[in-house]
Amino acid sequence: MSPVLKWAGGKTQLLEELMSKVPQTYNTYFEPFIGAGAFFLSLKPKSAVINDTNEQLINLYQQLKHSPSEIISIVSSLDEVACDKNYYYKIRERYNQKITSKELDPECAALMIWINKHCFNGLYRVNSQGFFNVPYNNKVTGKSLDKDNVEAISRFLKEQNVTILCSDFENACKKVSPGDFVYLDSPYVPESSSADFTDYTKTGFSYEDHDRLADLFVRLDKLGAYVMLSNNDVPLVRELYREYNIEPLEVKRLINRNAAKRSGKEVIVTNYQ
């Protein structure tokens, strides 16, 4: 299984590193910032709680679980028309209408998948009103989804004990117990004042949120859970997690508006060896 979306901060490039740090045994897996779910889909936990504050993203997971055939049908229908600029903006407007009316249904999920394949650089960005505003990528592409992959994800979400939430990250971790495994992959601390691409939701992610996240890490550690965290290798992160294991690594970032900045330094933080 692989993600149906490209997503800023997606972990496809780091899977080998992350998988090498998975605890040998654990109970329930928690991922309060699920994003595109690359690590989750690779890990295939038998029991999991996944969460995000992006309502459209969580609707996508709900619809993948319960209505995969409808998603496949709608995206296939959209793909029957050769995409150009006018068609893209027509579909984008339809998607924003769904956001306005809060219609969280199979069509909203299908539109999200289709737009992700045809927007510039696979970005997911919304403005202060919550509307998706990424322009067209000026490319005519083929199929916007892999039918077999969608069906495999749907089976997995149904057959395993996967709870899907849309809430604050602290709330998503309320039921963590000793022996559970928590992966914290929040929007990153910016490398510079201009590198603040955390607008996946209209509320963003603040420095105060990073302080709350660090406090949560400590509480989960004291509870007896296995905790792993990813973030940029910047002084604030090293200060917040100075009591824990910090491993630096070089990364390639598939989503960046500046091609020259698609590499960087990150850290993986754990409370276990």
Image (cartoon, rainbow, N blue to C red):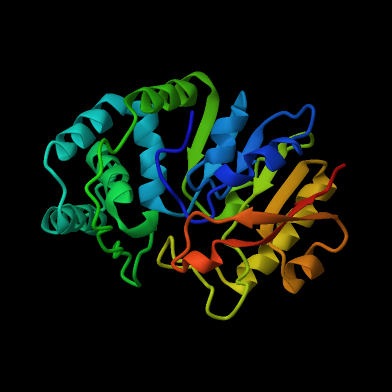
* Residue at the bottom extreme of this rendering: 193
Work out whether 62 lies above or below 223: above
**Percent from the top left, x then y, of residue 119?**
30, 56
Residue 175 placement, left or right of 268: left
Residue 198 appears in view = no
Q: Nearer the viewer, residue 97 or 138?
A: 138
Residue 78 appears in view = yes
Count all numbered tags in the image, as a single digit. Answer: 0
Work out whether 270 lies above or below 258: above
Work out whether 272 lies above or below 261: above
Q: Quadrant of residue 9?
A: bottom right
**Percent from the top left, x then y, of residue 258?**
47, 69
Residue at image x 27%, y 51%? 118
Residue 55 placement, left or right of 88: right
**Percent from the top left, x then y, of residue 241?**
80, 62
Residue at image x 59%, y 51%? 171
Quarter of the figure that contains the C terminus: top right
Residue 96 placement, left or right of 235: left
**Percent from the top left, x then y, of residue 154?**
41, 25
Residue at image x 71%, y 42%? 17
